[in-house]
Image (cartoon, grey):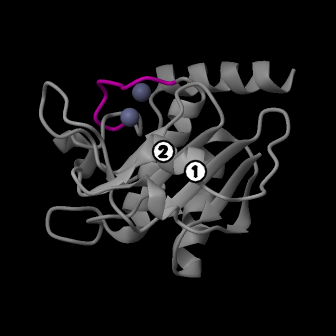
Amino acid sequence: MIRIVTLGEFPPDVLDHVQRRLHAAYGMGCELQGEAKLPKSALDQALGGYDGAKLIDQIDDDTELYGDDKLLYLTTAPISAPLGPMGKGPTDGFAQQGAGKCVVSSALLGGKNQLSLEAGLAKRAAHYVGHLWDLHHCYDPRCAMHPGWAPGFLQYPEVALCLFCREKSEKKIKLGQG
Ligand SMILES: [Zn+2]
Ligand SMILES: [Zn+2]
């Protein structure tokens, strides 16, 4: 089961759309779990946003994860990554690769040269949930595992997984349930 916890206000139809798209992409139930508070302690002034790893660690919520449950936090606040060799890192979310929790931000969606809030949030959610099943970045621009900072991500607003990523996620999900 994919459980969603919101850290801010989202229109119900947008959340509904995200749930449907995740269900379609991974063939797994997706439930709205509730709300939690954004941990202010994870705000990194130097980065100009929330440190995704810290945010997940410091969040105060009582959602229990069972078995292969995955937890997706949704926030409107920007997520920032430390400066890497390529400059500023991705700012749309953070996932514990191959583990249980991720956070996705709606920052910048609906703006200039961006996907709509609905389409963009669903695609970012599918991307970071994919990392939880240990999927890596994908060269196929139509695939949700194509990196969010690459132009191809914006060209294909539909949530889809390429055959390779789909098969890998299906294997991981089976393993987790078996
Ligand atoms: Zn990624
Ligand atoms: Zn792929």
Q: Quote the CA–CA distance across marks 1 and 2.
A: 6 Å
Residue behind mark 2: 54
Give coordinates of residue 62: x percent, y percent.
78, 57
Q: Secondary structure at mark 2?
A: helix
Tag 1 near tag 2, CB within 8 Å: yes
Amino acid type assigned to the residue bearing label 1 in the image: Gln
| In the depicted structure, whether residue 114 falls above or below residue 136 | below
Asked whether, in this view, residue 54 is left or right of residue 3, the answer is left
Q: Is 138 within the magenta? A: yes
Asked whether, in this view, residue 131 is left or right of residue 107, the answer is right
**Residue pictured at 52% horizontal, 73% vertical:** 14
Give coordinates of residue 95: x percent, y percent.
49, 38
Q: Residues within 10 Å of mark 1 (few under 14, many from 20)?
A: some
Q: Is residue 127 visible?
A: no
Q: Is 46 in front, or is 161? A: 46
| In the depicted structure, whether residue 111 falls above or below residue 54 | below
Q: Name the quarter where the N terminus is drawn.
A: top right
Q: Is 19 within the magenta? A: no
Residue behind mark 1: 58
Give coordinates of residue 127: x percent, y percent.
45, 41
- Magenta portion: prevailing SS class: loop
Amino acid type assigned to the residue bearing label 2 in the image: Lys
The segment highlighted magenta reads: 135-142
**Residue pictured at 30% horizontal, 57% vertical:** 49
What's the mark number on residue 68? Answer: none
**Residue pictured at 29% horizontal, 43% vertical:** 148
Q: Residues within 10 Å of mark 2 (few under 14, many from 20)?
A: some
Give coordinates of residue 137: x percent, y percent.
37, 26
Q: Name the quarter where the C terminus is drawn.
A: top right
Asked whether, in this view, residue 91 is left or right of residue 176, the answer is left
**Residue pictured at 61% horizontal, 41% vertical:** 101
